């Protein structure tokens, strides 16, 4: 099993030195699910919230959060993001799946940026809809896939996804 990289041999916290690493194309995709009352999902899809289009505001929040990840996660390297896409899948009767894909040509990966994007987009959905549904839940924030860098390609197995999704 690999060692934790954010601690030195004495257990002190450290930022990983990426100075000698080779810059490569790196891409990460993450997802989160927002579960809500069916009526809330209906209001979102019909764009009948007075605050505006919930999903477009959440998309913008996810994109903006991606660029702030290095300031939010203490040992995460601040990096320039080359691209980020935040999308939504409506699962009737009561869920929205948020998916973000982040890409960069850099010395470090963008897994945290992708997970930050889906987390903040999901929280934005909650914030915009809490006046009608305080029981909403943000669930199953996870990395689906990443590529690039020394550690290579990772893809979550479908079994891992279905296990998480079935814990209703």
Image: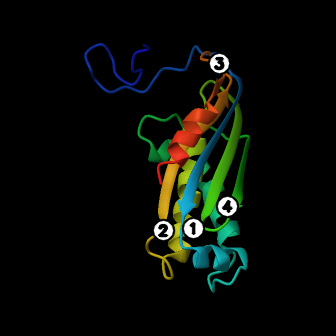
- Where does label 2 land, which residue? 136
Who is closer to the viewer here, 143 or 110? 143
Q: CA distance from mark 2 to mark 3?
A: 36 Å
Check contact, mark 4 vs mark 3: CB within 8 A.
no
Indicate left or right for 110 with 53 as reference.
left
Q: Mark 2: which secondary structure?
A: loop
- Where does label 1 land, which residue? 125
Q: CA distance from mark 1 to mark 3?
A: 33 Å
Residue 122, horizontal then vertical, whole percent: 56, 60
Q: Mark 1: which secondary structure?
A: helix
Give the mark, 2 or 4, whose residue is nearer the N terminus.
4
Q: Quadrant of residue 21?
A: top right
Tag nearer the camera, 2 or 4: 4
Q: Residues within 10 Å of mark 2 (few under 14, many from 20)?
A: many
Where residue 152 is drawn, which disc sits there? 3
Is 148 situated above or below 52? above
Check contact, mark 2 vs mark 1: CB within 8 A.
yes
Tag nearer the camera, 4 or 3: 4
Check contact, mark 2 vs mark 3: CB within 8 A.
no
Q: CA distance from mark 2 to mark 1?
A: 9 Å
Where residue 91 is drawn, which disc sits there? 4
Q: CA distance from mark 2 to mark 4?
A: 14 Å
Q: CA distance from mark 1 to mark 4?
A: 15 Å
Give the mark, 1 or 3, whose residue is nearer the N terminus.
1
Who is closer to the viewer here, 124 or 40? 40
């Amino acid at each position: 099993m690999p060692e934790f990289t954010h601690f030195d041999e004495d257990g002190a916290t450290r930022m990983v030195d990426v100075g000698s690493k080779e810059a490569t194309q790196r891409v990460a995709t993450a997802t989160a699910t927002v579960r809500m009352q069916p009526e809330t999902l209906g209001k979102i899809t019909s764009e009948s919230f007075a605050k505006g289009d919930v999903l477009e505001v959440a998309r913008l929040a996810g994109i903006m959060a991606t660029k702030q990840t290095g300031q939010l996660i203490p040992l995460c390297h601040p990096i320039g993001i080359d691209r980020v896409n935040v999308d939504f899948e409506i699962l009737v009767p009561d869920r929205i799946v948020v998916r973000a894909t982040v890409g960069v040509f850099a010395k470090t990966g963008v897994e945290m940026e992708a997970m930050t994007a889906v987390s903040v987009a999901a929280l934005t959905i909650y914030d915009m809809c809490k006046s009608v549904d305080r029981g909403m839940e943000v669930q199953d924030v996870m990395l689906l896939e990443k590529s690039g860098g020394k550690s290579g390609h990772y893809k979550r197995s479908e079994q891992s996804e279905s296990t998480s999704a079935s814990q209703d």
